[in-house]
Each structure stands twice: as structure tokens, then as C-alpha cells.
Amino acid sequence: MSTYTADLTSKLRFGAYDALVLTRRNLLVWFKVPAFIVFTVIQPVMFTLLFRYVFGGAISTGLKGGYVSFLLPGVIGQTAAFTSFGTAISLAFELQKGTIDRLRSMPIARSAVLLGRLGADLIRLLITVLIMIAVGYAVGFRFSGGVGGAALMIVYSLLMGLAMCCISAFIGLAIKDEESVQAFGLIWVFPLTFVSSAFVPVASMPGWLQAFANNQPVSQMVGAMRALALGHPPQAPYGDHLWLGPLWMVAVMAVFIPLAVRTYRRA
Amino acid sequence: MTNDHAIVVEGLHKSFGDVHALAGIDLVVPRGSVLGVLGPNGAGKTTAVKVLTTLLAPDSGRAIVDGRDVVAEAEAVRRSIGLAGQSAAVVDELSGRENLEFIGRLFHLSAAESRTRASELLESFGLTDAAERRAKTYSGGMARRLDLALSLVAHPRVLFLDEPTTGLDPRARNDMWAVIRQLVAEGTTLLLTTQYLEEADELADDIVVFDHGKVIAQGTADDLKDTIGGDVVEFTVEDKGTVATALRAVSGCGEGEPSATEEGEITVRAGRNGSAVLLEVVRRLDKSKLTVFGLGVRRPSLDDVFLALTGHKADDDDEIEGAA
């Protein structure tokens, strides 16, 4: 029994260590490639500014602070979803390149490749979100839900990023071809982020679209993040989101983590 | 028995749908020796390497590497092996040194140990000058050498090289051979797959020839040449429908049974009696009233050796390996 426990502890410790080494490796690759940085940081900042100044004037939200208050949690949610694109591409590329085969032929934890990928992508997302908040502050956004609300909003964005990265990990491992992932890997993210409450109030959409937009996971999460950032009292249409959103994310992970792990084992 | 052998494979099967990538493979590789696995694309070479390096579970059969079962003791096997696959599995954005150091860290070497080991390997693979450059800037040959170095970080006792020189120019291939010879001289057991007979001849102590997931010949390079060497009498039937008739007609003329390709080219191995066998073939063909052309006797080239063994040319391309 004690041997088993020791064995398990050391296994977990080594597993965490292996995942950390790979997280560090993946982040180093990110820092070294300007194109990755542009795609993952500059693009979200650009979205923030474009929506704020180009579309913002035409969209009325009825919120104190104007459209930018509405926008920032939404565009952060969109960024969390888009981050997962990198997960899919990297995994497909590494499979194709053979680097994953090398890692799988080594005595490292089976989970380390996936965890190292997700770890690096979440750190990348965190950096991006912090930069977006800074840019948001420069163009008029203010947290009005207190420090706790702001911190929790960031946590929610990471949870959302994690869930989306799990979907993308599965897609990347299943498609196995970088170019196909470039072409198809992100298609599902567009309707999910744009037909949501991320950029416009759902009430402005046609009725048949509202049914979807109101209830899909991105809206639920963005609703929750908005409530946390702006300190709304937990009431409709935001109140339920505080737990419905995370519940969606957990459900997504419950489906896609086993799928991704299974695909990884067979890849 | 397994103690004297680095690799023991018994009755290995692996299918992908209808494709039998491995259809009952047996292999024995003594410690410190080099086995060359020779075969065309789709012969099952890569699948065999993947099973032996724990990347793929076999459908049936058994494979022991360094005394451990690749399925039941995969973790232990991974501690003994190094793998360099068909493409250079290096991280392009990182330098050669960084690539090596990260692999060192994953083998739980300390930062200092990883650095020292990286320097050693860069030195012995002629990459010291390029150590700090991104691997992306490396030539094909350099990237392959780095890839091989990556597989050696933890001093593997059994090394698997899957087509280590495919796609390299002749000079880079020679450099690679020199590096591999040095490794072998240091006592590493090596299993090497190749499509090049010359490469197997250069590097391997023993050669097995794979075709359609089966071992169709094995022995030293000299054994193989002796077995199928000597003169070859060959001709092509005009009507492909008469291949079977022609094979029957010339059966027993030479050494072993004659073989035919899909194109209707028939080969009779003649050992040292080329002229006599040729005369006998002519006599029998005449009697059978078959129309043939290109009838002649000649010394086999290495590609002929392969053709004689597999019934098709070494560069025949089918897509099975891709599925693996």
C-alpha cells in the first residue's frame, strides 16, 4: 500500500515535472516567433480597438460606461476561444513533424504532451488577457465589480480558454495535418463567438437566432464574465450565467478531454 | 536467451483495416549488432519500428526489447531505446542546443547535466558551430544529425533509425553513415530501416528483407548475395496472360523457382551456370510456343537482388506505410 502511494506520488510529481518542461519549451517557441506573437496578442488588441471605435457607435447597450464596458468581457471571451486555434495547429504540426512520436518513445508521463500544450496555451492566454485589459483601460473600460470580480473574470476567461483548447486539441490530433487544421480548425469558433452576446446585445438579433445566441456556451460564459467585470447584481440576463457558464465549460471538457486523450494514444 | 539479444520478435501482427502492415514477423537481434531492415515503401518497416518503440500496440505476437516486453513493460522499454524517425523531429524554432537540452531535461537530467550532454553531442555530430542557430536554418543533413543526436541524449542501449538517410544528398548520406558507424563501434545495438540496399550493405551485420509485412529473406549481406546471387536469366512474355504458363515451362531450370513481375518479366536464378540455364530456358520456351522478348543472361545488380526477392522493384510505391 505504501509502495503504491509512493509510486503514485512520484508518478504525479514526474508527470507534473514533464508537463512543466514541455510548457516551458512551448512558451519559448512562442516567444521566438514574431508571427505567433502578432497572431495571439496584436490581433485581439486590434479587435478590441476596431469594435470599440468602428462598431461601438452603432451599438447601444444601455450600460453605464457605454459600449466599451459591454465589449471588453466579450472580446476577451472571443480571444479565449480563438486561442485554441494555436493548440490545434501546434499539435497537428508536431504529430506531422514526428516530435510527438519522439516524446512518446521516451519515458515521460503519457499526459505530459497534452498538459504541456494546454499549460503553455493558457499562460499565453493569460498574458494576452492582461494586455487586453490594459488596452481596455486606455480606451475607457473600467472594472466596476471590485478586485474580486475582476480576478474572477480573468479566471473565467482561462476556464473558457481551457475548455476551448480541449476541443481544439481533439480537432488537431484527429485531423493530424497542419494545413487542414489551418483551413478547418477554426470554422466552428466563428458562429460560436459571433452569434453570441460577445459583441452585441442578443436582443438586437432576429428572434430565431436569439434562441441559439442566448443559450449557447460562449454567451453563457461571456455573460458571466460581464457580470463579474461590471458588478451586476446576479439577475437576468446575467445572473444564471455565473454558474451556467462554468457548467458548460466543465461539460465541454468532460466530453473532449477523453476524446483528445484517446486520439492522442492512437495518433 | 533474451539476455544475449537486444531485440526478439515473435509472430508480430498489425493490421490497419484490411491492410496487413505486419503479417507475422520474427526477428532476433544480438546485442551490439546492427540489423538492417530492407524493404520498399509499404513493406511494414515503419510499423515494425513503431511497435518496437512502444508507439503502436501489436494485434498479436510478442516483442522484447532490451529484455522487456514492449506492451506489458512499455515504460521500461522507453528507458532503453532511442528513436530517430523518418523526418527530422526537431523543434525548428529552437536552436540545436536548446533542442538537446530540453530532451535532457525530459530525461530528468539537471540543467547542468543537460548542458554538458548537449555540448558533447553537438561536438561529436559536427554541430558545434551551428549550436546556437535555430534548427530551421539547418541543412537537411544537419537536421537529421541533430535528430539522431536527440535520440542519443540518454545513452540508449538499443537505437532505432527509420530510414535515416532518405531524402539526403549523397554527401550528407556519407556523413550520416560515418556517424552511425561510430555509434556502432561504441557498441550500441542498432535496428535500421532502409530502402537502399547499398545502405544495408554498408552498415548492417545482418539484413532482413521485408515485403508486405513479412520477412522474405534474411542473413548477412554476403549470405543474401549468395542465396540469390549469381547469374540471372530473364525474359518478358508478350502476353501477360501467359505468365503462369511461362513460369511452369521454365520451372526447375535454375536454382529455386522462377519469379515473375506484374509486367510479365520473368527471372530465373542461374547461380554460376548462366549459359547452361539460358540454353535450357530457350529449349523449354521453344517447346511451349510462348512469345517472349528481351531474353538474356546477366549478372544481378543490387536492385535485381531485390527484384528477385520481392517480385517487384525496390522503388515500388504503394500507400500502406502512409496509413501506418
Image (tube, rainbow, N blue to C red):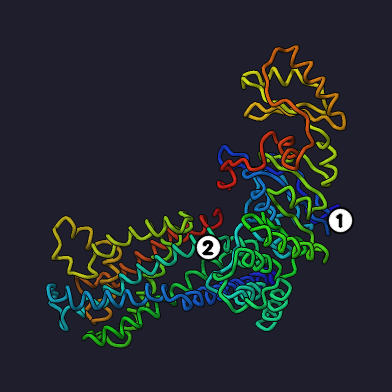
* Residue bearing mark 2: A94
Amino acid type, callout 2: Glu
**Which numbered marker is on residue A237?**
none
The residue labelled by disc 1 is: B4
Which residue lies at the image location 15% right of the left edge and 62% below the top edge?
Answer: A205
Q: Chain of mark 1?
A: B
Q: Looking at this view, is A22 or A261 the one in front? A: A22
**Residue lying at 43% horizontally and 74% vertically, measured from the top left:** A122
- Most foreground residue, B224 or B32: B224
The local secondary structure at tag 2 comes to helix
Q: Is residue A211 above or below residue A63?
A: above
- Point out residue B95 in the picture as x, y percentages from the top left corner: 58, 75
> Is B147 rendered above or below residue B15?
below
Q: Residue at x 67, y 74 (%)?
A: B127
Residue A12: percent from the left, percent from the top?
60, 72
- Please name which of the two marks, 1 or 2, marks the residue nearer to the observer: 2
Local SS, label 1: loop
